Image (cartoon, grey):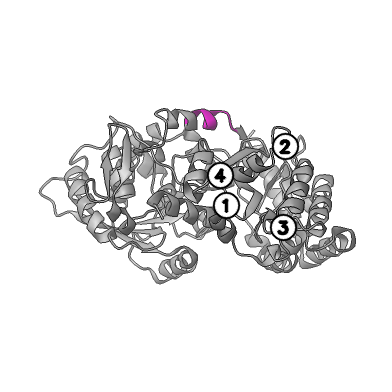
């Protein structure tokens, strides 16, 4: 499997939408200069960098080359420690609690929770460091990332400069579309899928018509206060009222449709307990699913799976806390060298030489340039296969051989056209209702996936599930969230 394919499948498995492989090119005049803050004769410091992803054979070899470069530029070397996807949140909690030496660490809304760990004191507040050592960085990254990732008015991390909005799409296996001459031009709503699903169910008994796993949630035009817990604010709200999503007409209609599709055999009977759909995408035995997109995503999906994939919008492009906080690098609160760590992050996000080395490895060993803009992976790239989205400013990256020259212009246009969620940058502090929130999470674990995938009949189960949530304390959690949201609105007119 190619490096590009492996990268993409890793990210898809962890963040659904979120988060796809990004590669690019660019030049920058904003890189830090050698010796910006240190005497060249000083002993270089070693920065310890914890990041997410399957540990790679050549990571130390690449970091040796990275360190030669960063020593010259900022008089610092780098030691990268990779922690595998499923182990990362727990491992980092242990590291923080034990005071493990570290300077830079990956965090996100969906991996080692950024907001909660910032509030617990795991990360250093970066406001002053950004002003003194990160000026080039702040001039390079889309300001919406830095503004939208503030916690209680302060920056605790540097978000990756990548796609800014979240946009849902319906993805289709184009081989099956072509085989039955199916038209997707009128597809947008969940209900509009039915005629296509019916054809595939009747004519392709070995194909899963509607592929999904236990993380699937029908799209409705709301932004969740806490991802996939049933309290949310409508995207076109005027009163900023937090509602139980299960009581909204939009979700009730969607759940009824999901139950209809489940009973018709369009959805796998195991959907509510399936961890991922990787087996289906590898084999091509699926017709449609839903995913988060970015510019040129169809090209990436097609290259990753080895057969053509096309998509059409299922939602507008909305900038949410989840999209802004999807990939962040923080400085540890117990870092020995916070100033130097910020110098490194400034360099990583402004210098294309460093950024591409961290992403793709050593030129001539792991990859080669095929022209001034485009790169091609070499066989040794299998020993250094990194999740690009987690490593800084993606818009500095070399282009893959099949990328158009204007790839990053397309990303900038996509970002500019995104619409802010009404609760963008509002981060709920659940410390006053932590016991209730734990109980609500337990109810969610019992019923959520079965309800969302159509496995449970909403006509006979929805009211009971709503009551279970309320018994667990959801109404108290929502009331606390509403008080905080009202105060946030008053302070951020």
Left or right: 275, with 301 as reference point: right
Looking at the image, tell me whether mark 1 or mark 2 is earlier in sequence order: 1
**Residue 318 lies in what quarter of the image?**
top right
In the image, what residue occupies the spot 41% across and 55% down?
Answer: 1
Callout 4: helix, strand or loop? helix
Residue 386 x %, y %: 37, 53
The quarter of the image holding the C terminus is: top right
Callout 2: helix, strand or loop? loop
| Mark carried by residue 187 | 2
Looking at the image, tell me whether mark 4 or mark 1 is earlier in sequence order: 1
Looking at the image, tell me whether mark 4 or mark 3 is earlier in sequence order: 3
* Disc 1 + disc 2, Cβ < 8 Å: no
Mark 4 or 1, which is nearer the eye? 1
Mark 4 to mark 1 CA distance (whole Å)? 12 Å
Mark 1 to mark 2 CA distance (whole Å)? 21 Å
User: Front-most of 205 and 280?
Assistant: 205
Q: Which residue is mark 3?
A: 205
Mark 2 to mark 4 CA distance (whole Å)? 24 Å
Residue 416 x %, y %: 54, 28
Residue 128 x %, y %: 38, 43
Q: Magenta span covers which residues?
A: 412-418
Is residue 390 in the magenta section? no
| Mark carried by residue 323 | 4
Mark 4 to mark 3 CA distance (whole Å)? 37 Å
* Disc 3 + disc 1, Cβ < 8 Å: no
In the image, what residue occupies the spot 71% across and 46% down?
Answer: 219
Answer few, some or many: residues within 10 Å of disc 3's Cα (few below 14, many 20 plus, some between 14 and 19). Answer: few
User: Front-most of 81 and 430?
Assistant: 81
Left or right: 267, with 281 as reference point: right
């Amino acid at each position: 499997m190619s490096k590009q394919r492996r990268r993409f499948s890793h990210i898809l498995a962890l963040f659904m939408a979120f988060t796809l492989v990004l590669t690019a090119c660019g030049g920058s005049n904003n890189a830090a200069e050698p010796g910006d803050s240190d005497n060249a004769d000083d002993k270089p410091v070693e920065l310890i960098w914890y990041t997410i992803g399957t540990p790679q054979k050549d990571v130390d070899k690449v970091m040796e080359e990275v360190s030669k470069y960063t020593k010259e530029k900022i008089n610092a070397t780098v030691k990268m420690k990779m922690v595998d996807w499923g182990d990362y949140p727990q491992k980092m909690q242990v590291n923080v609690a034990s005071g493990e030496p570290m300077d830079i660490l990956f965090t996100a809304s969906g991996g080692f929770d950024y907001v909660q760990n910032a509030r617990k004191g795991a990360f250093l507040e970066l406001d002053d460091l950004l002003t003194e050592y990160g000026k080039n960085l702040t001039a390079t990254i889309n300001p919406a990332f830095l503004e939208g990732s503030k916690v209680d008015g302060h920056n605790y991390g540097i978000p990756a400069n990548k796609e800014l909005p979240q946009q849902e799409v319906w993805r289709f296996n184009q081989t099956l579309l072509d085989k039955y001459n199916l038209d997707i031009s009128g597809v947008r709503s969940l209900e509009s899928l039915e005629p296509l699903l019916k054809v595939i169910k009747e004519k392709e008994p070995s194909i899963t018509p509607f592929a999904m796993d236990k993380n699937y949630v029908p799209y409705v035009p709301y932004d969740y206060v806490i991802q996939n817990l049933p309290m949310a604010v409508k995207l076109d709200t005027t009163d900023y009222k937090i509602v139980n999503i299960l009581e909204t007409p939009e979700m009730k209609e969607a759940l009824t449709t999901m139950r209809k599709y489940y009973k018709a055999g369009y959805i796998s009977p195991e959907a509510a307990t399936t961890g991922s759909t990787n087996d289906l995408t590898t084999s091509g035995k699926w017709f449609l699913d839903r995913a988060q997109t970015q510019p040129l995503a169809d090209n990436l999906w097609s290259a990753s799976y080895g057969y053509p994939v096309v998509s059409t919008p299922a939602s507008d492009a909305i900038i949410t806390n989840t999209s802004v906080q999807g990939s962040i690098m923080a400085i540890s609160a117990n870092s020995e060298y916070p100033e130097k760590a910020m110098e490194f992050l400034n360099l990583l996000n402004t210098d294309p030489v460093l950024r591409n080395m961290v992403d793709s490895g050593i030129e001539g060993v792991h990859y080669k340039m095929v022209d001034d803009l485009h790169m091609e992976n070499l066989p040794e790239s299998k020993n250094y296969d990194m999740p690009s989205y987690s490593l800084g400013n993606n818009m500095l990256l070399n282009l893959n051989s099949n990328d158009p020259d204007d790839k990053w212009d397309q990303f900038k246009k996509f970002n500019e056209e995104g619409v802010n969620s009404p609760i963008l940058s509002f981060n709920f502090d659940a410390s006053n209702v932590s016991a209730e929130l734990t109980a609500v999470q337990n109810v969610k674990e019992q019923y959520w996936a079965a309800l969302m995938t159509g496995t449970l009949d909403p006509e006979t189960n929805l009211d009971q599930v709503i009551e279970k949530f309320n018994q667990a304390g959801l109404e108290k959690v929502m009331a606390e969230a509403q008080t905080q949201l009202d105060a946030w609105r008053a302070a951020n007119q």
